[in-house]
């Protein structure tokens, strides 16, 4: 029997209409649709995004990716998820994995795909690119992300304030992902560099509950969700 | 009469199916569809991407954005394009501007929109985000673009080799856009840093003529098109 294919499908940043035509086509063609399980009883983010696109005959598969740092807990979870996906692939069924944002951009899908291919080197994986959060945030703010010769730097959640200073010296446009955990310290740096009026936060971009913060001088402290992105125009150009 | 709206629509990187559902909906709802004119008799890139999505009753509007550095030539062209768009908006007609890649990411649309709003501050502009080239390239290569705490740096066409050295010291993942004009000098840097086997070039990602170069040690020289992107995994993680 021919093996099924695992499709990593970028479903965009929140608005269900920000999936691509290609992503939707593959999503709807796969008999099995997987996604990261939500916390507690709540559906996961990717699941929320795609819920209206699923057809009654499709089987959903919520995979457990715990929000922890412990490496062995993570590896066990990836292996468990890969085994669950493999059960379908080995029966010749294609599996779509719905991935919030873009599937190549700080995505859980990477670990699932790599673990699957470690366990079963014959597994076939394909991906469909999509809308990532920096692009969605720029459109939400109605400002260009980058123009001309501007350099763009993107930092994920884990960084030190020294790193932030370095990158503000270097790049014209700086994006900090998941800024919630370090916001107050970042605010101090922006204040010292007189960049508060050249910085914006977008929380849950393109979701109905999207929230935009401008003029950050007013907000030395903010309670932000995990899906918060800070955009800084670091130099006057 | 109510003014028309100018929609900046990201149409993705080449494959016509990489437009979002939202982008396609706005594209098909606007009576006027604008795009950058091609060179000579050839259709422009965005025009090629959307051609199968247009309806017979839609009017196309090719806008001239010359490929030059001269500022006053550029400003004249932007003003001319803005006036052409305004002729339709003032008659209450919505205009879709089709933009290759993402509309906020080093896009001609930015200049058109800013010039239009300088000339006519009452003009209303909205944008739809889309698939940008780094995401498309990662999917084409079947590698993750970024994972975990990796820092990502994106440099556009204009940069010096010193800048490249700095960014390779700093970021784990480096993207050089439009690498065609500086490829040989970049290759020397990658060679000296032993990064040739951790670098990939994708030319015309997601177009039928997409071409991938791996193992760059074999290619100290390459004739590349304008739409060539170099991805470097700078540090071993």
Image (cartoon, coloured by chain):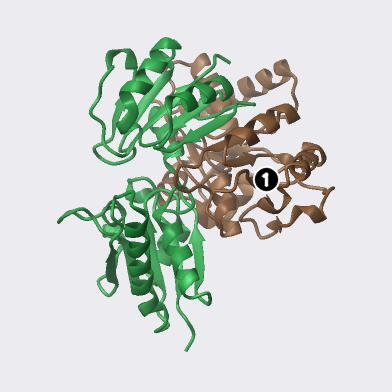
Chain colours: A brown, B green
Horizontal arrangement in the rendering, residue A183 relative to residue A201 (left or right):
right
Above or below, B29 relative to A193: below
Out of A97 and A202, give the one closest to the viewer: A202
Q: Quadrant of the N terminus of chain A?
A: top left
Above or below, A199 relative to B174: below
Q: What residue is pinned by disc 1?
A: A230
Above or below, B210 relative to B71: above
Residue occupying image coordinates x 30% and y 52%? B49
Report helix, strand or loop for mark 1. strand
Residue B116, by quadrant, is bottom left
> Which residue is farthest left?
B41
Horizontal arrangement in the rendering, residue B40 relative to residue B200 (left or right):
left
Residue B215, can we see it?
Answer: no
Residue occupying image coordinates x 41% and y 16%? B190
Above or below, A138 relative to B32: above
Question: What percent of the width, then of the height, locates residue A237?
Answer: 54, 48
Question: What percent of the width, then of the height, locates residue B181?
Answer: 31, 32
Residue occupying image coordinates x 49% and y 40%? A9
> Which residue is farthest bottom?
B1
Question: What percent of the width, then of the height, locates residue B92?
Answer: 42, 82
Horizontal arrangement in the rendering, residue A7 relative to residue A47 (left or right):
left
Out of A218 and A14, give the one closest to the viewer: A218
């Amino acid at each position: 029997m021919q093996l099924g294919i695992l499709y990593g499908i970028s479903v965009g940043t929140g608005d269900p209409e920000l999936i691509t035509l290609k992503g939707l086509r593959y999503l709807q063609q796969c008999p099995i649709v997987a996604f990261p399980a939500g916390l507690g009883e709540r559906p996961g983010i990717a699941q929320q995004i795609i819920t209206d696109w699923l057809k009654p005959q499709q089987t959903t598969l919520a995979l457990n990716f715990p929000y922890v740092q412990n490496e062995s807990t993570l590896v066990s979870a990836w292996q468990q998820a890969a085994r669950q996906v493999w059960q379908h692939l080995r029966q010749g069924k294609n599996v779509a994995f719905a991935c919030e944002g873009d599937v190549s951009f700080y995505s859980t899908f990477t670990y699932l795909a790599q673990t699957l291919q470690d366990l079963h080197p014959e597994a076939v994986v394909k991906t469909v690119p999509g809308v990532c959060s920096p692009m969605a945030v720029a459109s939400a703010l109605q400002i260009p992300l980058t123009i001309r010769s501007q350099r763009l730097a993107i930092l994920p959640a884990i960084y030190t304030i020294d790193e932030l200073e370095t990158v503000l010296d270097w790049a014209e446009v700086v994006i900090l992902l998941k800024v919630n955990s370090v916001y107050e310290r970042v605010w101090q740096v922006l204040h010292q560099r007189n960049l508060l009026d050249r910085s914006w936060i977008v929380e849950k971009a393109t979701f109905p509950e999207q929230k935009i913060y401008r003029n950050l001088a007013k907000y030395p402290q903010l309670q932000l969700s995990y899906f918060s992105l800070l955009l800084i125009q670091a130099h006057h150009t």
